[in-house]
Image (spheres, helix red, strand yellow):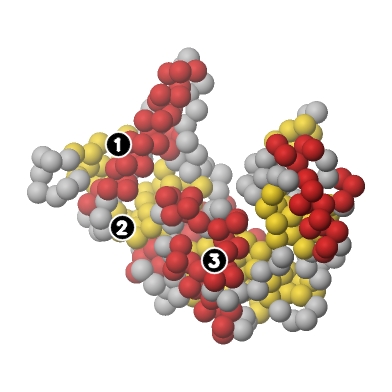
Amino acid sequence: MNEESAVLVATEVADATADMVIARLNQRGVPVVRFDPADFAHGMLGLSAWFGTCSVPVAGQVRTPSRALDLARVRAVYWRRPRWPVYAALEEGDARYAAAHVRYGLGGVLYALDGPLWVNHPLREVAADYKPAQLALAQRLGLDVPPTLVTNDPDRARAFIAEHEQVIHKTLRSTPYERDGVRLGGWAEPVAVEEIDDSVRTAPHLFQARVRKTSDVRVLVVGRRLFAVRIDSDLLDWRLDYSALTYSAIDLPPALAAGLHAFLERCGLASGSFDLALDADGRYQFLELNPNGQWGWLEHATGLPFSAALADFLTRGEPT
């Protein structure tokens, strides 16, 4: 590689969304170094960093099997979908120790860099990924939020469902797991009063009044740019069947667009994917933010330049 500054892309091997952005960066002649932290476990990723021994606070290098990048040349970090290593050959305690040192060694070195643009900084993504905090921030910014209850009290849950009649249950965190060998997802599902029992006490649950929606809307914000896609279907949760969906690019009301930009600014994020519901009264209801949401299939379906906007942002700090 030449001495031009480069974009550091942290993601897993099979990531079609990252592939799209990297292709755009290649078209612009921007050097890219792609890596996955999981490769530490296989000896395929190298990291060296010096502190207190040179004229800058941190100096060093990230090395993959095919490329090496001086930390001083990192212009941007695209923290897309990295995996943390699993040390299957080590004893449990040793594996836990090694994995922690990757997280705090690699993370600490990258966080120490002063110059790069992040999309998005992992610590800020984590802080922004709490749904109750998202709902409160959305309301503070003047966005419409459906009536929502977070509780582990069965009586309060029953009262909320009785008050709003049509209520859905949503996960507070997407955590796929298996029960009796069947993989379960975090879909939004209707819930009735008679389904509430003492098992609710085990952990907080999120209950939300069902929006009388005419469509769903997925919004990608990249810097100052915003792209909105209307998703039409008869599904409560459109993620259940992508073949049943139709898409159309739309413009959001200026006040709503400004609110979403302000939301990301408050979170310290450069980019994020919002899910909204357009109700029967023509109002956009805020559902949630995914700080690192998927959008690749929407670019193919609508032709909107998501990947180009991200490549421009990673290159110059703002898309053209």
Q: Nearer the viewer, residue 74 or 218?
A: 218
Give the answer, above or below, for where 229 lies relative to 108: below
Q: CA distance from mark 3 to mark 2?
A: 27 Å
Q: Name the spot of residue 294 as percent of width and height, x first.
A: 60, 57
In the image, 280: left or right of 113?
right
What residue sits 54% from the left and 74% below the top? 141
Say which quarter of the image contains residue 207. bottom right
The amino acid marked with disc number 1 is: Leu
Q: Give the spatial CA distance, label 2 vs label 1.
A: 17 Å
Image quarter in which the C terminus is found:
bottom left
Measured as percent of width and height from the top left, residue 307 is found at 51, 65
| Percent coordinates x, y for residue 158 in the rendering | 82, 52
Q: CA distance from mark 1 to mark 3?
A: 38 Å
The circle drawn on residue 47 is: 1
Q: Nearer the viewer, mark 3 or mark 2?
A: 3
Q: Is residue 81 left or right of residue 196?
A: left
Provide the residue designation for mark 2. 116
Which one is closest to the eye, mark 1 or mark 3?
A: 3
Amino acid beneath label 2? Pro
Q: Is residue 35 visible?
A: yes
Residue at 43% across / 18% down in the picture? 94
Q: What numbered label is drawn on residue 137? A: 3
In the rendered view, does 171 fall on the left or right side of 123? right
Neighbour class for label 2 at 10 Å: few (<14), some, many (≥20)?
A: many
